[in-house]
């Protein structure tokens, strides 16, 4: 995982258990698709999942830091320290780190409605996933997030949807206020303005009878009359729906041919959605109620949409439910790209960006300097604190500081810099009190430092706070394990099945 860290982190090709291929440097995806067997390694994977659920970013930070702590612990154990002494030393170092961390905050996002400041906050995270496209993507995500930010309630990640359409380039991606579905309409009407929408989860068709029977038809007249009853009943139902004010019928199941005929005659639009999650999102966006049976809707059960139309992007047909910018509860980011794999990777970067925005709304918008500046500063202060202690605690604390430096070291290695020289320069700058100095991964000469704050390379405060917590907790839990006991069935190998062609 260390080689996948930072903007210049290398991609991994992961082939999962169903032979699906992933090309990515996103830690969550790699760990999700790998089948980890070792219980201790599994614990680290679970920690990274916890970080993903809590913050939505910084999973690789947790894995690398936890691994570096365990590396340091191994050396201490060989020196003769007891695991419990290392445990206490690490816990003390974590407490000190969490005490220092608030003092390192270098920027605060006060106005979450300001797209530019939000885009600058998200930029650092996007840079580590999609280096080179960070400015365009961060503006796109900021625009989508700010447009659906509620006035008082908390921001929900589900309010930002992603629609991936093959073809063209990333620069042609856009934000649509409302929802976009990759499909065509069922009937002939393909655009309406200021329409009322009724949503059903059942098929829009003639109801099939519950009993089985045989009908004997003797004349042609009887044959024509036979299905008339069903037809007139369906026509009445659809006319009642039209009279209730509905202009668009959305169904989570199929539309029958007869039903489509009457829908077209009544001048209504028919849209079929194959996913129940899509139906749920549409109801939330349009403020509609999903009806379980084909009944006439009440006024409050109807949703409202400003504009619904069919469009074509590349050679893909889409149905767009568009809302006015200030009213929309959901925004869709339409991503374009040359290959499916590339778009999947962009989607993961967008996901992280949206989660960072959620973190900004939950916290006070506090940002820390990125590019390894925080880790080096924490390492420096932990060392100074350890020097004041007299017990055995100071040895684990020195190793804790060393583990913190594993992150800027990984950044330097992945960017082709000399790690020892880069770390020496960083320590030198931080010793002089330049707390915002980080690594310049683009440097071609000896000048490997930059001011992370003025360059706008920031990390979310919660991301580092939870990351330090989770990684240290996992390392200390593993340190207190002395045996792994697997509850396996007793006995030797399983008996071979009888086979007539067995040479043995």
Image: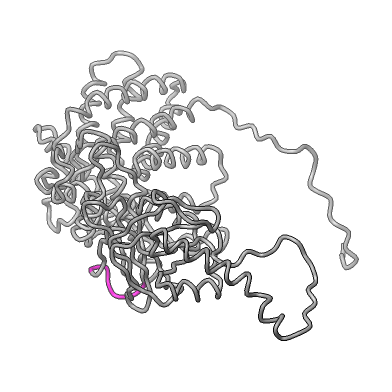
Give how far across and how far down residue 356 sits, in percent: 28, 44
| Residue drawn 25% across the image and 26% down it | 382
Asked if residue 487 is positioned above or below residue 292 in the image, the reply reads: above
The residue located at (29%, 37%) in the rendering is 153
On screen, residue 108 versus residue 462, left or right, reads left
Residue under the point 41% across and 58% down: 244
* Numbered disc total: 0
Q: Horizontal placement of 411 versus 318: left or right? A: left
**Observer-nearest residue: 151 or 404?**
151
Q: Is 247 positioned to the left or the right of 126 in the image?
A: right
Residue 497 percent location from the top left of the image: 85, 57
Q: Which quadrant of the structure image shows residue 386?
A: top left
Q: Residue most toward the bottom?
A: 220
- Is 372 magenta? The answer is no
Query: Above or below — where is 123 with respect to 106?
Result: below
Which sits in the foreground, 474 or 121?
121
Q: Residue at x 44, y 42 (%)?
A: 49
Does 331 sit above or below residue 112?
below
The colour scheme is one colour
Which one is nearer the viewer's eye here, 122 or 110? 110
> Residue placed farthest to the right in the image?
500
Q: Quadrant of residue 59?
A: top left
**Boundaries of the magenta span:** 166-171
Q: Residue furthest top?
A: 390
**Quadrant the C terminus occupies:** bottom right
- Between 289 and 6, the one lying in front of the other is 289
What is the x, y in percent for residue 233? 58, 66
How far across and how far down the image is residue 422, in percent? 19, 46
């Amino acid at each position: 995982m260390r080689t996948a860290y930072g903007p210049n982190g290398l991609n991994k090709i992961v082939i999962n258990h169903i032979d699906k291929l992933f090309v990515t440097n996103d830690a969550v995806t790699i760990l999700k698709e790998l089948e980890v067997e070792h219980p201790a390694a599994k614990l680290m994977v679970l920690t990274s999942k916890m970080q993903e659920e809590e913050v939505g970013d910084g999973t690789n930070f947790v894995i690398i830091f936890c691994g570096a702590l365990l590396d340091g612990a191994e050396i201490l154990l060989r020196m003769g320290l007891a695991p419990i002494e290392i445990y206490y030393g690490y816990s003390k170092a974590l407490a000190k780190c969490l005490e220092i961390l608030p003092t390192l905050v270098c920027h605060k996002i006060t106005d979450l409605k300001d797209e530019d400041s939000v885009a600058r906050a998200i930029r650092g995270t996007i840079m580590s996933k999609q280096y080179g496209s960070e400015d365009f993507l961060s503006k796109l995500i900021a625009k989508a997030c700010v447009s659906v930010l509620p006035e008082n309630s908390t921001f929900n990640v589900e309010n930002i949807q992603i629609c991936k359409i093959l073809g063209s380039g990333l620069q042609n991606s856009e934000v649509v206020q409302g929802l976009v579905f990759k499909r065509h309409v069922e009937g002939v009407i393909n655009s309406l303005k200021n329409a009322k929408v009724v949503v059903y989860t059942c098929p829009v068709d003639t109801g099939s009878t519950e009993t089985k029977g045989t009908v004997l038809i003797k004349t042609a007249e009887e044959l024509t009359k036979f299905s008339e009853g069903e037809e007139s009943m369906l026509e009445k139902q659809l006319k009642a729906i039209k009279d209730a004010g509905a202009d668009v019928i959305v169904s989570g199941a199929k539309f029958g041919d007869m039903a489509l005929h009457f829908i077209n005659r009544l001048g209504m639009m028919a849209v079929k959605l194959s996913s129940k999650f899509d139906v749920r999102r549409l109801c939330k966006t349009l403020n509609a109620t999903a009806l379980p049976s084909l009944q006439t809707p009440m006024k409050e059960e109807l949703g409202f949409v400003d504009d619904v139309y069919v469009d074509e992007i590349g050679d893909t047909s889409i149905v767009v439910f568009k809302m006015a910018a200030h009213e929309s509860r959901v925004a869709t980011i339409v991503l374009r790209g040359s290959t499916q794999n590339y778009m999947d990777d962009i989607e993961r970067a967008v996901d992280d960006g949206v989660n960072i925005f959620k973190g900004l709304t939950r916290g006070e918008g506090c940002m820390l300097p990125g590019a390894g500046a925080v880790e080096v500063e924490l390492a420096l202060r932990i060392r100074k604190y350890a020097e004041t202690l007299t017990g055995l605690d100071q040895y684990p604390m020195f190793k804790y500081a060393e583990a913190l430096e594993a992150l800027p070291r990984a950044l330097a290695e992945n960017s082709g810099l000399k790690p020892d020289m880069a770390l020496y320069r960083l320590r030198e700058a931080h010793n002089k009190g330049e707390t915002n100095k980080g690594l310049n991964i683009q440097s071609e000469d000896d000048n490997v430092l930059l001011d992370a704050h003025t360059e706008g390379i920031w990390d979310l405060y919660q991301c580092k706070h939870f990351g330090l917590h989770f990684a240290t907790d996992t390392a200390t839990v593993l340190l207190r394990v002395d045996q792994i006991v697997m509850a396996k069935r007793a006995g030797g190998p399983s008996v071979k099945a009888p086979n007539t062609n067995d040479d043995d």
